[in-house]
Image (cartoon, grey):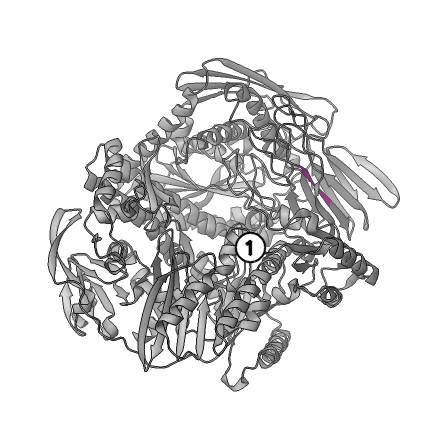
């Protein structure tokens, strides 16, 4: 009967994670959370292993198990506790991603954990939006080391007050935290209902079975690769400070039901903000393998999927940043390059399942002043797939956030969008064409500070099997009659009537054009 | 005589009232020309018809199959790709081979026009006549059947849209402008809705023309997705409003039945062949503005129906990890479940047949014999893989399908702060009766109501629906600005009034409902609150109910106003006549969690009003079968409507 119960309980657990997401999204304040779905909700078991996660945004996915692993031993967990953190060096991603963790008890026994992580519009620091070119984590915003937000049912009001006054638009931040708390509380109610109905032992037994089931499925896809070693290297354009390529190198070794993903030879961590915390690197690896798994059918995403995958990183490198390096763009930019590198290597093992490089950047734009902070990302071209063209004007791989409606943006902020279009012919040629990138033009209606964090302004997204690369991205500022080509990563002050043009990269082509 | 017709993918249902007697009929649909089945059934019945209310899938199907008109999409220059970029997201996360929704407009037919309205509604760049001339020329060179116009920020100031509409009407083709279709903010959603409207107009127009020609003497009304009907002329202008009218009819039916039984809280449960639709009614029929039609937003008010991919035809399979799965793929009507005789695809219907809950010779009143041996074979193929018995496998399929359906029921009730214990389940659609008891137990629902005509229930709903028209306007007001708000409401009400007057409605017969889309300033989703004097408090209460918190010191804004104009309901009495018995009583074997048990089979037609009986029993009707589980008690109510109460429920005593 296991075959039937596994499916039933998979539905029951994922319904809880999904409902937590609905509560958060619909009642939150940050456009990042509500409009762009830049958040994730998950259930972990008492051992800190992932049980179920609502599919919201891949870059959080592998990071949450890392968070749990780091935080579980730090506290003497009590019923009614809630922990808050955004520490990138303790399983976090970047500072704006605030994570809340709630233990769920059944009769004095720790049974489950619930986690919700959401990207707040601001977390303090030097620049509005907290997504800027910096050199030290302290410039990026407030670092919240894991600590109590609620202790045995009592809200740590002093802590909360002190925290939010340091952030831009504290009202909104408080609202977002309230929405996050509400989401966890909802999850706890639902888990307790399940425990009451089926008993804790039954649930724990089924959780183990679910993990084993997903593990078996993941092993099936790993076994399909010829048991060899595959390597690939690609580069980040720069760290925003120094014009120097930053290599990311991977070696993937398939051994029967196991796979080792080794990043040890990647560059050391750098001064600028493109350093990726280890959790982000894990996310990228898991994302790629889960997408491969998807070619076999839909399986529950839980810790079992990750068991056959061993990830090796060296501390203090670009893929495993240590304190006090700046990490804002590690989550959004470097994560995409890590995916590209993995795809490059795996294309040799799975030639018919792996797409060419997609635009490889999230094209982050942060706009603000003393009072307001707005942040958005722009999609690009998807790499061509074996047998299919890539999609145009879409978010790929580690993100899937929605755009903010132009009418909402213009209503709320002193900005006008003059053009939002598909960037024709930016996808790489090939038997299958890479998708085209996007063009977005902003006219500023006030003096504002703007940060751009973008990649693939120097190195093009690669094609595979003879497909041509996609076009590079471009950032251009028009001031009066002057046309200024901007670097990929920059903090700048714009004046009223300035125009900013962002052209995002196209995807690589696949196969030679016949 | 008044009648209603619901055209579905497989069947066309016909319900009419003759001297207070409700009669119903079911014929096979004629998808190539749906009017054929309609005219055929009317010919068969051969009665003098005055009024016909019609719900049709013509629009929905034309969209799903991308068989709408060739349209031009005109927008502000710089936004020509609006419909192709959408919200910039991909529909699936972990899928390298994901596809975007299939477009319905050709990119070469999208035109940008130099004009601009600001976020405050001011004209920044006037729309020059030369620009319109340029577009006119292009449209003459490259003709289309229909045009959609959506300018940025036009919801605040329609002057450019109105101007271009006027000029383009020279072309003699329908022009849909976004301000008239949906004067609300969020450009992609508004553009998509307007374009869908333009896309469906010619198809709907042709279809209605044909129908009118076949029914020259009849007053024809068209059911809309908001649950009410409109005149044919309105449907010809707002074709997009006819989407989902069938399921909407079902919900209207549930609402009417609920009223008859004096219930204000019910959940409608409509299990069909490919999917299950559920809707929670608490005093009023709920609507949503976030309906997605095959990947594209249709943001007009649509009855808030939650659909899941589990129905009678849902396919069961064993995945590579050795786990049993059900749906969302469906065997459809062709080839259909294994027991239809054309395939060996195991489905939920096959599982019900194997478990003895469906009788092979009772389907469609015995006109269509189900082949049990094929169902057994199909499911045994699965059971071999699972190492279970055929019965255990079939029961597993039912349990998984029930889990999926109960997730849908939870989504509309528990997850929105409602307790299912306070609701009755109104069950209809061909397959619902086989699953209703089990689902009620799962959710703690205390009462199930099943009408005898459960198989033609949507058409019944249409027959008693009111005329209904929705008006809206985004206003961006602080909730505290009471005076301004009242002015805006008055304004929208007046324009609604004159609109209805132009359609020929008598104002005395009209009812107005006002709703406010409200949110805390800074949020991205609005809650729709019925307007009352203490609308701010009502908003806070609803927010707390749905999300578990409120924040009293936060400013609140009213984003959009809605006025719903409702005409008079048909409130005639009706009853249904007793039909002849189809089956003599006998006993059959049904497999349950306890193994095989013997239960009586009862013909619905043999039941007497007021009669009570206990489960387990199988009650059989022409178009539906009801599996009464052993903990349930049945009461035969007026018009042979069955009411099932959970045996252990304390209310059984007062039954």
Q: Position of residue B13 (x, y in %)?
A: 37, 65
The residue lying toward the viewer, choosing from B313 and A126, is: B313
The part of the chain drawn in magenta is A436-440
Q: Does residue B592 appear left or right of residue B497 in this picture?
A: left
Q: Is residue B113 above or below residue B215?
A: above
> Of residues B439 and B77, which is closer to you in this image?
B77
Q: Say which of B306 and B474 sits in front.
A: B306
- Rendering quarter of residue A436: top right
Give the quadrant of residue A434.
top right
Magenta: predominant secondary structure element?
strand
Q: Is residue B322 visible?
A: yes
Q: Position of residue A389 (x, y in %)?
A: 60, 34
Look at the image and tell me in which quarter the N terminus of chain B lies. Answer: bottom left
Protein chain holding label 1: B
How many numbered discs sit on the rendered protein?
A: 1
**Quadrant of the rendering where the C terminus of chain B is positioned:** bottom left
Q: Residue A6 in the image: state x and y as whole percent.
A: 30, 38
Task: Tell which residue pokes out farthest to the top in this image.
Answer: A228
User: Tag 1, which secondary structure?
Assistant: strand
Q: Magenta span has A140? A: no
In the rendered image, the residue lying farthest to the bottom is: B508
Residue bearing the label numbered 1: B297
Q: Position of residue B31 (x, y in %)?
A: 45, 57
């Amino acid at each position: 009967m296991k075959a039937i119960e596994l499916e039933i309980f998979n539905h029951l657990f994922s319904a809880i994670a999904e409902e937590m997401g609905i509560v958060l999204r619909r009642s939150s304040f940050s456009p990042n959370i509500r409009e762009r779905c830049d958040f994730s909700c998950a259930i972990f078991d008492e051992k800190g292993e992932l049980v179920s996660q609502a599919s919201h945004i891949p870059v959080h996915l592998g990071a949450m198990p890392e968070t749990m692993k780091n935080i579980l031993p730090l506290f003497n967990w009590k019923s009614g506790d809630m922990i808050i953190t955004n520490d990138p060096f303790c399983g976090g991603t970047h500072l704006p991603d605030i994570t809340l963790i709630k233990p769920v008890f059944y009769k004095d026994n720790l049974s489950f954990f619930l986690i919700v992580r959401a990207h707040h519009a601001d977390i303090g620091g030097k620049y509005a939006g907290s997504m800027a070119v910096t050199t030290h984590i302290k410039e990026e915003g407030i670092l919240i080391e894991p600590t109590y937000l609620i202790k045995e049912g009592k809200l740590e009001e002093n802590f909360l007050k002190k925290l939010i006054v340091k952030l831009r638009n504290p009202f909104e931040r408080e609202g977002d935290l309230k929405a996050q708390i509400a989401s966890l509380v909802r999850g706890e109610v639902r888990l307790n209902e399940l425990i009451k109905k089926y008993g804790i032992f039954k649930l724990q037994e089924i959780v183990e079975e679910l993990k084993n089931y997903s593990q078996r499925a993941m092993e099936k896809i790993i076994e399909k690769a010829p048991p060899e070693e595959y390597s690939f290297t690609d580069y980040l354009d720069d760290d925003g400070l120094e014009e120097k390529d930053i290599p990311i190198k991977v070696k993937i070794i398939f051994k029967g039901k196991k796979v080792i993903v080794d990043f040890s030879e990647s560059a050391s961590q750098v001064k600028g903000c493109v350093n990726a915390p280890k959790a982000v690197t894990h996310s990228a690896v898991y994302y790629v393998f889960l997408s491969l798994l998807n070619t076999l059918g839909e399986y529950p995403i839980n810790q079992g999927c990750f068991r056959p995958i061993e990830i090796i990183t060296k501390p203090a490198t670009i893929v495993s940043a240590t304190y006090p390096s700046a990490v804002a763009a590690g989550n959004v930019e470097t994560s995409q390059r890590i995916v590209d590198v993995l795809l490059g290597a795996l294309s040799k093992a799975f030639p018919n399942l792996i797409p060419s490089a997609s635009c490889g950047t999230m094209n982050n734009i942060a706009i603000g002043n003393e009072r307001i902070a707005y942040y958005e990302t722009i999609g690009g071209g998807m790499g061509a797939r074996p047998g299919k063209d890539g999609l145009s004007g879409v978010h790929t791989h580690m993100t899937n956030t929605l755009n903010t409606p132009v009418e909402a943006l213009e209503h709320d902020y002193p900005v006008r969008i003059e053009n939002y279009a598909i960037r024709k012919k930016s996808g790489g040629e090939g038997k299958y064409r890479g998708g085209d990138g996007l063009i977005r033009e902003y006219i500023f209606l006030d003096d504002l500070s703007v940060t751009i964090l973008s990649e693939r302004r120097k190195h093009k997204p690669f094609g595979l099997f003879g497909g041509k690369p996609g076009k590079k991205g471009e950032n251009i500022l028009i001031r009066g009659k002057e046309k200024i080509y901007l670097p990929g990563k920059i903090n700048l002050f714009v004046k009223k009537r300035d125009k900013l043009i962002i052209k995002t990269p196209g995807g690589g082509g696949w196969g030679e054009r016949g | 005589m008044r009648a209603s017709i619901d055209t579905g993918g497989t069947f066309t249902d016909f319900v009419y009232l003759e001297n207070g007697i409700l009669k119903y009929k079911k014929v096979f649909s004629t998808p190539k020309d749906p009017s054929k089945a309609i005219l055929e059934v009317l010919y068969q019945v051969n009665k003098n018809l005055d009024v016909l209310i019609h719900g049709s899938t013509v629009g929905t199907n034309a969209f799903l199959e991308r068989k709408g008109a060739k349209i031009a999409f005109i927008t502000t220059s710089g936004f020509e790709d609006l419909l192709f970029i959408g919200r910039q997201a991909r529909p699936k996360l972990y899928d390298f081979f994901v596809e975007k929704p299939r477009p319905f407009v050709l990119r070469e037919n999208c035109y940008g026009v130099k004009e601009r309205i600001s976020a405050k509604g001011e004209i920044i760049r006037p729309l020059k006549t030369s620009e319109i001339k340029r577009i006119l020329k292009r449209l003459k060179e490259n003709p289309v059947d229909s045009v959609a116009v959506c300018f940025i920020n036009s919801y605040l100031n329609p002057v450019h849209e109105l101007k271009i509409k006027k000029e383009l009407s020279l072309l003699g083709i329908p022009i849909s402008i976004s301000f008239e279709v949906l004067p609300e903010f969020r450009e992609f959603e508004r553009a998509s809705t307007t374009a869908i409207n333009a896309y469906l107009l010619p198809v709907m127009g042709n279809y209605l023309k044909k129908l009118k020609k076949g029914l020259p003497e009849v007053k024809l009304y068209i059911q809309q997705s908001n649950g009410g009907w409109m005149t044919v002329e309105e449907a010809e202008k707002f074709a997009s409003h006819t989407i989902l009218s069938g399921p909407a009819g079902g919900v209207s039916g549930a609402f009417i039945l609920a009223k008859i039984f004096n219930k204000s809280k019910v959940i409608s449960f409509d299990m069909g062949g490919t999917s299950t639709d559920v809707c929670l009614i608490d005093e009023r029929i709920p609507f949503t503005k976030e309906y997605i039609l095959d990947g594209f937003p249709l943001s007009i008010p649509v009855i808030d129906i939650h659909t899941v991919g589990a129905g009678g035809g849902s396919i069961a399979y064993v995945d590579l990890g050795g786990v049993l799965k059900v749906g969302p793929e469906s065997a459809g009507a062709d080839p259909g479940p294994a027991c239809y005789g054309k395939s060996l695809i195991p489905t939920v219907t096959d599982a019900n047949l194997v478990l003895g809950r469906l009788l092979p010779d009772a389907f469609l009143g015995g006109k269509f014999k189900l082949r049990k041996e094929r169902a057994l074979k199909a499911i045994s193929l699965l059971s071999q893989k699972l190492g279970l018995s055929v019965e255990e496998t079939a029961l597993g399929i039912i349990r998984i399908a029930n889990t999926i359906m109960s997730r849908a029921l939870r989504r509309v009730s528990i997850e929105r702060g409602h307790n299912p214990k306070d609701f009755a389940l109104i069950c209809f659609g061909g397959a619902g009766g086989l699953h209703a008891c089990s689902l009620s137990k799962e959710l703690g629902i205390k009462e199930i109501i099943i009408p005898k005509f459960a198989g033609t229930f949507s058409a019944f709903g249409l027959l008693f629906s009111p005329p209904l028209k929705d008006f809206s306007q985004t206003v961006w007001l602080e909730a505290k600005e009471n005076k301004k708000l009242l002015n805006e409401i008055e304004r929208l009400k007046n324009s609604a009034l004159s609109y209805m007057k132009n359609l020929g409605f008598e104002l005395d017969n009209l009812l107005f409902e006002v709703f406010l889309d409200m949110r805390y300033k800074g949020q991205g989703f609005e809650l729709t609150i019925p307007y009352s004097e203490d609308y701010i408090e009502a908003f806070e209460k609803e927010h707390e109910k749905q999300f578990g918190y409120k924040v009293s010191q936060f400013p609140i804004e009213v984003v959009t106003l809605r006025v719903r104009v409702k005409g008079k309901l048909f409130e005639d009495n009706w009853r249904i006549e007793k039909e002849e018995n189809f089956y003599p009583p006998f006993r059959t074997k049904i497999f349950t969690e306890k193994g095989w048990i013997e239960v009586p089979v009862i013909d619905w037609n043999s039941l007497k009003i007021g009669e009570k009986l206990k489960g387990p029993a199988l009650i059989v009707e022409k178009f539906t079968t009801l599996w009464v589980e052993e903990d349930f008690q049945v009461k035969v109510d007026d018009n042979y409507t069955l009411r099932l109460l959970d045996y252990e429920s304390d209310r059984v005593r007062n039954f």
